[in-house]
Image: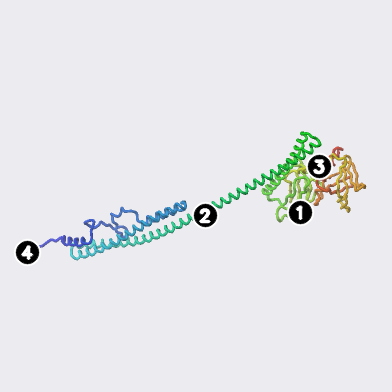
Amino acid sequence: MTRVIHDSGDGVQKEALDLVSSDVNFPKGHFPDYRIGPNNQIIDPEEAHEAVPLKEIVAKETAQLLEQHKRLSVRDLKEKFEKGLSGATKLSEEAKRREAASLDRQVLLKKLRDVLDTLKGRVAGRNRDDAEEAISLVEALAVQLTQREGELIYEKAEVKKLANFLKQATEDARKVAEEERALALAEIEKARSAIEKVEKALQVHDSASSSRQKEEIEELRKEVREARRIKMLHQPSKVMDMEFELKALRTLISEKTQLCNQLKKELAMIKRLEEDSSDLFELEGSDTLGSQLCIIPRVDGAPNIANCPIQWYRVISGGTREVISGATKFTYAPEPFDVGRLLQAEIVLNTDKTIVQTDGPIENAAGLERYVDSLMKRTDIEFNVVVTQMNGKDYSSHSVHVFHIGKLRIKLRKGWSTKARESYSTMMKLCGSRGGGNAAARAVFWQARKGLSYTLAFETDRDRNAAIMIARKFASNCNVALTGPGDQGT
């Protein structure tokens, strides 16, 4: 009778476990519960709750550093780089530990595979199938560990690169901080030196201006004292001294006012030129009596107006224009009749008309009225002149003549010979020269009677304007409006 013994293989398993336990210490008494994930990856449930992979941590920190790079200062960037370097060092050490643990696991898996192969040869049936399944699990685990080892090697290389990058960046940041600090200190020193230079220049300018003003004030005081002393010698009166001082102040204020008006006109002209750049021509010259206005091109390429018709006008009240008869040249010298009025010049270019105008009304020359008053007190008012034209033709002789202006008549003589002598009448005309030329500001046109006219050149423009004003005052006393040809009497 045969005896059948049912052997479950517990003895063999116990022997195999004894062999394994002699080299390996298992934390548990059974195989770990692995499960197959996507792409045939073995997933350990115990490791599912572990920390985020090192690669993701490094990528996240790198992205944060790149985002904060623009808004961090050099010092903060340096501190961040130092923190990142310490973190990279820690990650490198952790990678080394994991590499060592990975090597230990490879050794353990190799020993476990040998034990399972030995166990597989000793068992049969269902236990053999379990042994084969355990071997396949061990092989899969070995493959997973190999993959993890590759990833660890790659992560180690990345961590090493990051550590080198952070170290280099830290050094660069330190250098940049030092360079920026040196540059900032240099700029500060330059700014300080520049401020000191400006302060010194301002002090020198203030001291110079103050000393100049003091000198001018002292000179004015000396002049006032001297004038007061001279005045007191003749008429010792405080009232006269005060009148003299007031007169001097009025003269000074008048000169300053004229200067301010001139500056205002120049500013207005500059603004007008900036605002309107379409005009081809402009007037050159001061808007004061005694000057000479000239039409000049404003832009390059302006047409030549030498042969173009030109007519000068004076703008009276209400904007009405009055033709200045005979003023058809590109130059014109204002006369006393133009004071307080705007002057315009109309240029005809083919079929187009261009108008240029003075910036403001013509103003009287400084000190001209006082000069006229002083001449009016004389018994004989005479001026030295040169006859340039007679009846519209050039005068051959350029000798000096005397132009005598009386209360009832005007006389032109050369020595004891009288060239012309006429009383004030409606046939007499007297005005500034309107024929152009360089000496127009010093020349007058005098029509003594019908059929006899002269163009006279005075020594100065002040004499020319004073002669016109005096003659018109004397003619007005005789109820005669002494104007130029074609002018309307006022």
Q: Amino acid at mark 2?
A: Leu
Q: Which mark is residue 371?
A: 3
Report which quarter residue 220 is drawn in.
Answer: top right
Mark positioned earlier in the residue sequence (4 or 1): 4
Q: Which mark is residue 1?
A: 4
Within-10-Å neighbours for mark 3: few <14, some 14–19, many 20+: few
Separation of disc 4 and disc 1 at Cα? 152 Å
Residue at image coords 87%, 46%: 403
Kindly identify which residue carries mark 2: 183
Q: Which callout, 1 or 3, points to the residue nearer the camera? A: 3
Mark positioned earlier in the residue sequence (2 or 4): 4
Picture coordinates of residue 458, whole percent (x, y) = 84, 48
Q: Which callout, 2 or 3, points to the residue nearer the camera? A: 2
Outermost residue toward the left?
A: 1
Foreground pick, 448 / 189: 189
Q: Are marks 2 and 4 in contact (CB under 8 Å)?
A: no
Q: Are marks 4 and 3 in contact (CB under 8 Å)?
A: no
Q: Amino acid at mark 4?
A: Met
Q: Amino acid at mark 3?
A: Tyr
